[in-house]
Image (spheres, rainbow, N blue to C red):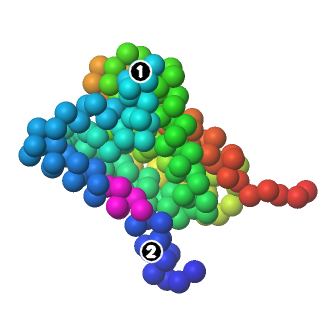
Amino acid sequence: MSKRALVFPPNFKLVLYAMAIMCLIQVLGGIFGLPMYRFGIVPHSVQHLSGVLTAPFVHGSWGHLTSNLLGLSISGYLASRLPKFKRATCFIVIVTGLLVWLFAGAANHIGASGIVMGYFGLLLGVALFNRNVLGIVSFIALLVLTYYANISFLATLFDFSAQTSSSSHIFGFLSGICAAYITKPNRIA
């Protein structure tokens, strides 16, 4: 692996593209007054099942988007350094969205926080299941960076305030741990 790839993992470009799309959608929604909430996940609503794929790109305000971008830039950067990042990301997006659609409370769930928490779970799971240097160092780096960015992992995971989709946080975290387990390398003992 080149020195440049160590500093800027190629998969992180995908995270940056997703973040750019989120910003573009926020701008277009503000300029044209588009009803962006129709792209969210409304549990048990077949019309909103597509929100499983679209909800992470839609945010209720610039503050909502900014907080998700901060978490996504930290956790996405560290997760993008892991092998099977693309497979794990697809798993996190789909499983988190489906679990929210199936089990969350009646609301319109939007935002990328489920994916942010999914990356937290992925990094923890890789540290636990793989027990390799990259996984452990990545998780420790996540804890240190979020501490200095004034992001409380436990407070975010268990935020049950009315404006927060705690279901997205919890299901994202659990899907990240599952993704780590599913994508772990097979070891022959």
Instruction: Check disc 1 and report its element: helix, strand or loop.
Output: loop
Return the residue found at the far left: 31
Q: Is residue 188 above or below residue 91?
A: below
The quadrant the C terminus occupies is bottom right
The quadrant the N terminus occupies is bottom right
Q: Nearer the viewer, residue 135 or 11?
A: 11
In the rendered structure, which amino acid carries the disc numbered 2? Val
- The residue pinned by badge 1 equals 45
Q: Quadrant of residue 35?
A: top left
Write the start and end of the magenta stretch as one range. 14-19
Q: Is residue 119 above or below residue 107?
A: below
- On residue 7, the disc is 2
Mark 2 to mark 1 CA distance (whole Å) = 43 Å
Return the residue found at the far right: 189
Residue 20 seen by the camera = yes
Q: Nearer the viewer, residue 95 or 176?
A: 95
Badge 2 density bin: few <14, some 14–19, many ≥20, Cα 10 Å: few
Return the residue found at the far front: 47
* Residue at 79%, 56% in the rendered image: 186
